[in-house]
Image (cartoon, rainbow, N blue to C red):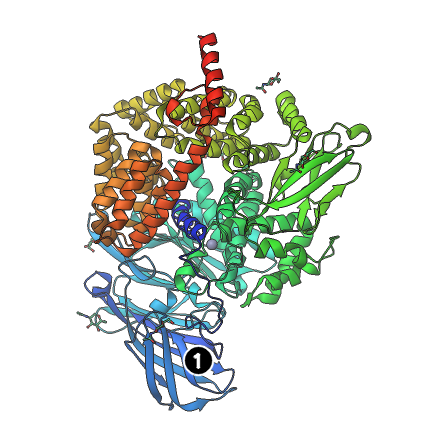
Amino acid sequence: MLKDKMILLGILLLLISTFATNSSYKIIQDDTNDFLLPDIVTPFNYKLNIAFSKDNLDSKNDTFGGNVEISFYVKKETTTIKLHAPSNKIKIEIGTIAVKDQKFNETTSVLTLNLSEKLAPLTKYVLKANYAADINTKYMRGAYRSSYKNRTGNDEYLIATQFEPTSAREVFPCFDEPKYKATFDISITHPYGTQTLSNAEMDTTLPSAKDTVVTTFKETKKMSTYLVGFIVTKFTFDTVKESGVTYKVWSRDELKGYRKFALEWSKKILLALEAFTGINYATSNTKLDQIALPDSQPAGMENWGLVTYKEKSLLFNGKESSNFTQQSILETMAHELSHQWFGDLVTCHWWDDAFLNEGFATYFQHYLLGDIINELSPWEMDNQFVVDKLQPVLVDDALKNDALTRKVIQPEDIRSKFDSISYNKGASIIRMIANVMGESAFKAGLRKYLKTKSYSNASPSDLFNSLENEKVNLPQKIGVLMEGWFNNPGYPIITATQQDEDLVLSQKQFSYNNDDKAKHAKWYIPISYTLQSDDAKFSSPAPRVWVDPKKDLVIKGAFSGKSANDWVIINSLVSGYYRVNYNGTLWQRIEKQLRENHKEINRLNRAQIVDDIFNLARSDNGLQYSQVFSYLDYLKNETCYYPWTAALASLNFLITRVANQKPLETALHQKSLELMSGVYNSLSLNSSKSDTQITLLKRKLIFSNACKFGAENCTKQVKSLYDAFKATSQPIDRNLRNVVYCYGLRQSQDDKDWEFMWKLYKETESPSEQIEILEALGCTLNDKQLNNYLDLSLKISEIHKQDLPTVWKAVYSNSQEGAKVALNYLIANHAAIKDYYPNAENLLVGMASHVIDNDGIQKLKDFVAKADVDESYKKAGSLAIKTATENVNWIQKRRTDLESYLQLTSGSTITTTFSCLMLITVTLFNYMTV
Ligand SMILES: *[C@@H]1O[C@H](CO)[C@@H](O)[C@H](O)[C@H]1NC(C)=O
Ligand SMILES: *[C@@H]1O[C@H](CO)[C@@H](O)[C@H](O)[C@H]1NC(C)=O
Ligand SMILES: *[C@@H]1O[C@H](CO)[C@@H](O)[C@H](O)[C@H]1NC(C)=O
Ligand SMILES: *[C@@H]1O[C@H](CO)[C@@H](O)[C@H](O)[C@H]1NC(C)=O
Ligand SMILES: *[C@@H]1O[C@H](CO)[C@@H](O)[C@H](O)[C@H]1NC(C)=O
Ligand SMILES: *[C@@H]1O[C@H](CO)[C@@H](O)[C@H](O)[C@H]1NC(C)=O
Ligand SMILES: [Zn+2]
């Protein structure tokens, strides 16, 4: 599964706060927990029929019927069977064995059957169930309905499924844990005029009862229940057949012009995966359907042979869509298709190890795609990984207190495993293993892992067993070296110190909060490094030495002879998952090198230095922002995308926290623009044919931030492009559309401008461009427009429900005005919003990082104190209060330093004698320079 970045963020923040408080969340480690099935029954085949009437499809009836025959063995004698089921509307038979009683627990979804006779091992039994279940009308999971307007403006309906991780049980009785793999013979009864698809190839279609047909599919290979899927639609498709696999890309007919791209690339991606894994897709499935759904919770879901996507995550129009959309679609496809091996063929044994699915899919999303794409144009997917996945999750991981293998049992907790830790930390650790072992040994080990665990399940020890047989020179078994990275929360920061001629490396768990005494985990840390006088600098991600968990590492004589005054950079090419701090002179040497010729240091390591220094200032460890700005003054000369991605993430974090303090915010904007002067002047708004993907990314990054920070040169150019577009429909460079829409709109108070963009949204066919416009519509600073926009987000006829979080985030994250409007709107309309969008509390959590003053905190407090507010809001609201309070305290601690550095005077906040002295100095300085 691949979540939308934004939705991931909402959930992530919820978790961060949850774990920071360490109270509302309990981990239950008891194997006999009622939510888990006792490991007695082994199902091996399901014959499943589900029947959807025309009324089911058209919204007139939400209840559907089904029947299933589950063939199974038992591991030991038993008179009790437990399985998951949709409800107690179910009638069960097990051959001639009578069911004495049957109990269904609503909380656990476990159905307990007490039987009149003992079941014995080595005997095949068949459990037959007739049941009724409901279409999920609240959440896009289980079997849910979606709708869209066809060419004549009528509503068309469809039914789709989303079972991962625990929603198969909402649709049919089953043993709904990934380890219970079985084969599936599925048939779907559906209305005339619709088609149905499922995991396996279609076998027959026959008329059934009135107005319906029944479509039967071939038997699947052994697979987990969460990977079962089906859809009932009137969609059309494009197809191609190659190497024994029939590829089809499906969508509503209106979007048929957007399917060719995905069809072509599916083949390339699948072939690359076959080449890497040594296992052909066709051994498991003869077809691959990929479907663009108008409503889907995740961006993509890897149901075996039946991958579902959001429309914007699969459909591409080469003439209109941006190069970023193209990249994001290919990343999502590569992610889901990697899952056909990592996840579908070999599945995590239990959700504790969700990263064995998601970490690998995220890793291949970059590393495999990189290989295919690079033939055409250098996308640097491996470099992009560092700033897109690794650096952001270093932030998340330090805020949480979760190991990669965190234990989960209940469905709500299991859903919370689909977070940046499983995806991005998982992928970062996998990448680190690849760097430690070297590519060919890593690949050989993975092939063995897939081969030995095909159609079965795996845990981290299975992975290590497969990797361990590869001949690699390591200080310990790979399982021993990696244990801490899997089982400890967080990650280390290395401090590098020179002692005479030696280099001393010590480790400590990184934390933003110095009071965090609990954080003292240790790791085996692979150390790659480069010295200034090395002949081949930054040439290898392989470790040269290892830091041991028990003691500091002393590299004898590192600074002897010709390297006496060298700088040293630890973690070449950011090959490992940790931060680095340099003590005293070692830092000064790096700073000098950056100032004199920064290109001597690899660009990924420059990004690392920038990210680490900013995050040291973000933490309470004593480094002040004034020092950071002076250390990183070299940025004025920096024109590379990677260090700038890191720098702007941190600058925006800081600026968001002062967005209500005008002189300080303005001064930080100015300071940021001063640092950006070099890179800004190196770019123009006009693209050229020879631009690489990275240049395109850089242009978007730099111009959007320059306009955001108010650079006049930027806002003027953007406004004139916007005006020209409005007046004459002169098309805007598709890679700059977001920037022009957003900052064009921001400079206007005219309702006509907003309505112009809204009309464009309504008229645009392309799903990805629609999202770009939705993001831009929140850029306005006009309260009335913002409120109106939030009104529209609650109307299904105007904006798809799946896009509601996009709209809200566009409003609350683009400006302090927007953040205030969104909070007030939510408080005033909380019941209606909850009714329409059941996950509404996530909006509150997302907003929390933009609540930065006591006024906002008070509003939140009054809100959670109200009697008529839903419990879920109260819980999220309390977390939001905590986050907002931390925001206020955090900036309070740093305000004096920033104000004096930026030469602002603000008497009210200065309290200590030291600060008063600083104030005097600053004031004098101001007089002298006037
Ligand atoms: C809804 O459909 C189910 C299954 O076909 C049927 O049993 C039930 O009677 C229907 N309900 C209504 C109100 O028509
Ligand atoms: C259902 O399971 C929950 C969780 O174990 C338990 O607290 C509750 O008592 C059970 N309900 C019934 C009716 O047994
Ligand atoms: C649109 O949907 C309506 C209702 O299902 C149907 O009658 C009409 O033929 C459809 N139009 C097209 C162009 O598919
Ligand atoms: C930095 O170096 C100084 C002087 O060598 C030493 O006293 C101090 O402990 C070092 N700091 C760290 C964190 O190693
Ligand atoms: C920019 O680079 C030049 C040399 O290329 C150097 O002289 C100057 O000091 C650098 N500026 C900063 C701010 O580091
Ligand atoms: C951007 O997209 C266009 C159109 O699809 C393509 O011609 C161009 O090569 C792409 N640029 C890069 C750097 O991939
Ligand atoms: Zn996934």
> Could you say where residue 685 lies in the image, as x and y percent from the top left?
43, 23
Q: Say left or right for 104 vs 465.
A: left
In what quadrant of the picture does the C terminus appear? Answer: top left
Q: Quadrant of residue 69?
A: bottom left
Q: Nearer the viewer, residue 752 or 492?
A: 492
- Along the line of sight, which residue is nearer the eye, 406 or 333? 406
Counting other residues with Cα less than 10 Å from the Cα at mark 1, is it few (<14), some (14-19), or many (20 or more)? Answer: some
Front residue of this view, candidates 31 and 325: 31
Give percent across and percent down for residue 263: 44, 49
In the image, what residue occupies the spot 80% across and 28% down? 562
What residue is pinned by disc 1?
71
Q: Is residue 926 visible?
A: yes
Secondary structure beneath disc 1? strand
- Where residue 679 appears, as percent x and y from the top left, is 51, 23
Depth check: give the residue in front, 317 or 776. 776
Residue closest to the far front: 913
Splitting the image into 4 quarters, where does residue 892 fall? Answer: top left
Q: Is residue 680 visible?
A: no
Quadrant that contains the N terminus: bottom left
Count every numbered label the image shows and give the total: 1
Compared to residue 663, the image places residue 406 above or below, namely below
In the rendered structure, which amino acid carries the disc numbered 1?
A: Ser
At a point 35% along the width and 46% down the height, the residue shown is: 880
State the residue at coordinates (46%, 17%).
Answer: 920
Residue 843 image offset from top left, x and y in percent:
32, 46
Above or below for 20 versus 281 = above
Is 824 on the left or on the right of 141, as rendered?
left
Q: Is residue 571 left or right of residue 871?
A: right
Q: Relative to residue 41, is residue 603 depicted above or below?
A: above
